[in-house]
């Protein structure tokens, strides 16, 4: 599938829940929000059907996300079923890592995900300082995350990626410990610019730290970094390297990189069954109603194609964007 601007769509991010066991400042608005009622959330069969039809249209990569995907029971079995869909070549998961080491009959959730065929894993980690981690996430779960990362490595995950959202006057203190932690375990560390996806207020001068400034601050510790224009993972991260050690560092500059959207290949399915052609746009299209009204696969395929046709050239984050949904209810 190709949209009007030449984006070739092969990647679907599926949010399996809007629920989470953490409360990250940048992801959830301050005020208490109600979760989606259970009946509004797609069941796994509905999601698998969308994935099957999507795969027949050229979707090859799937990322399971949320909210916190590992809070939804049966997520490993869901991943195993995704792996059975012809055409799906890669399954990834984005998690806060807090539940990866949880054991069921002596097997960790990380191991069950690996056995299910998940090969790409992103773990959010904003700080290695327990108190700072608690302030950002409102939960004292750093030890669990660290256990979870070890469980994932033991389970066989390679190229595990750590995602850190850049927050001014906060992340500056984390650069050295995070770089060291990632280097010691062979993890790929990425820094993400703050986006206005929970509320507009989170993205103000006081909080925003650009990838460019982050890189310069890191260079004060590592010496000049070398750009790696040809090194790519699945997304829009730009990678740099510490020449003396070879460590690679990713920078995801959604706000400041004007070319950010050029190679976008994604669609997003929210847990309440909306198909979104772009994270940073108000556009969303109701797939759940169609599914539940009994549309056939051809109608579903037409619907997916019509959403691709509406994919915008780029996100609206730079246009004083006021989010209509919290990040947690979209799926990062
Ligand atoms: N709960 C999982 C996790 O934390 O990784 C998956 C969902 S979370 C919404 C996916 C990613 O979005 C995380 O890496 C998180 O740090 C990022 N994220 C959330 N809010 C953000 C914001 N306002 N700006 C940039 N990234 C954000
Ligand atoms: Fe939960 Fe992930 Fe959002 Fe944090 S970033 S509140 S862990 S969904």
Image (spheres, rainbow, N blue to C red):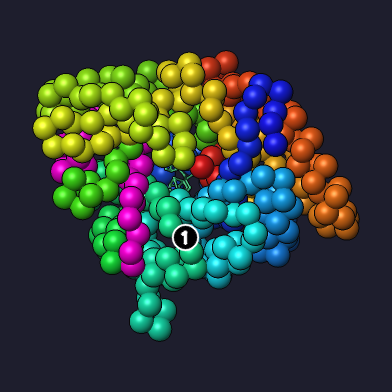
Q: Residues within 10 Å of mark 1 (few under 14, many from 20)?
A: many
Left or right, 166 with respect to 185, comes to right
Q: Which residues are magenta?
A: 155-180
Left or right, 254 with respect to 159, comes to right
Q: Residue at position x 33%, y 50% from top? A: 159
Does 91 sit above or below residue 242?
below
- Where in the figure is residue 82, as x and y percent of width and height? 60, 61
- Where in the figure is residue 148, as x and y percent of width and height? 32, 62
Q: Residue 21, can we see it? A: no
Left or right, 242 with respect to 202, comes to left
Number of numbered discs: 1
Image quadrant holding the N terminus, namely top right
Does 180 sit above or below residue 20?
above
- Where in the figure is residue 129, as x and y percent of width and height? 20, 47
* Quadrant in the picture for residue 157: bottom left
Q: Is residue 174 magenta?
A: yes
Disc 1 element: loop
Q: Nearer the viewer, residue 56 or 296?
A: 56
Q: Residue 242, can we see it? A: yes
Q: Residue at position x 49%, y 68% from top? A: 116
The residue carrying mark 1 is: 118
Q: Residue at position x 11%, y 32% from top? A: 244
Q: Residue at position x 64%, y 61% from top? A: 85
Indicate the quadrant of ligand 1 in the picture.
top left
Asked whether mark 1 and ligand 1 are closer than 8 Å, the reply comes as no
Left or right, 247 with respect to 259, comes to left
* Quadrant in the picture for residue 237: top left
- Where in the figure is residue 138, as x and y percent of width and height? 36, 49
Q: Is residue 102 magenta?
A: no
């Amino acid at each position: 599938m190709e949209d009007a601007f030449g984006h070739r769509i092969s990647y679907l991010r599926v949010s399996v829940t809007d629920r989470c066991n953490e409360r990250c400042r940048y992801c959830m608005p301050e005020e208490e929000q109600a979760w989606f009622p259970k009946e509004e959330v797609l069941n796994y069969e509905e999601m698998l059907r969308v994935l099957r039809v999507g795969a027949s249209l050229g979707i090859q990569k799937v990322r399971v996300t949320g909210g916190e995907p590992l809070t939804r029971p049966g997520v490993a079995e869901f991943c195993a079923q995704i792996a059975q869909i012809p055409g799906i070549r890669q399954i990834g998961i984005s998690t806060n890592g807090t539940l990866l080491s949880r054991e069921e009959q002596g097997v960790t959730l990380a191991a069950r995900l690996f056995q299910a065929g998940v090969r790409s894993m992103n773990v959010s980690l904003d700080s290695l300082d327990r108190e700072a981690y608690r302030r950002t996430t409102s939960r004292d779960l750093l030890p669990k995350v660290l256990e979870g990362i070890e469980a994932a490595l033991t389970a066989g995950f390679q190229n595990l990626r750590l995602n850190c959202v850049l927050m001014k006057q906060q992340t500056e203190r984390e650069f050295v410990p995070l770089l060291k932690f990632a280097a010691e375990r062979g993890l790929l560390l990425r820094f993400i610019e703050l986006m206005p996806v929970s509320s507009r207020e989170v993205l103000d001068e006081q909080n925003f730290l650009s990838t460019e400034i982050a890189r310069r601050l890191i260079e004060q510790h590592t010496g000049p970094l070398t750009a790696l224009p040809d090194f790519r993972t699945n997304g829009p991260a730009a990678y740099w390297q510490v020449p003396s050690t070879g460590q690679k560092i990713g920078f995801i500059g959604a706000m400041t990189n004007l070319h950010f959207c050029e190679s976008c290949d994604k669609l997003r399915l929210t847990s309440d069954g909306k198909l979104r052609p772009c994270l940073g746009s108000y556009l969303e299209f109701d797939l759940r109603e169609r599914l539940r009204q009994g549309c056939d696969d051809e109608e579903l395929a037409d619907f997916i194609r019509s959403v691709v046709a509406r994919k915008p050239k780029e996100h609206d984050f730079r246009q004083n964007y006021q989010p209509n949904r919290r990040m947690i209810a979209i799926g990062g």
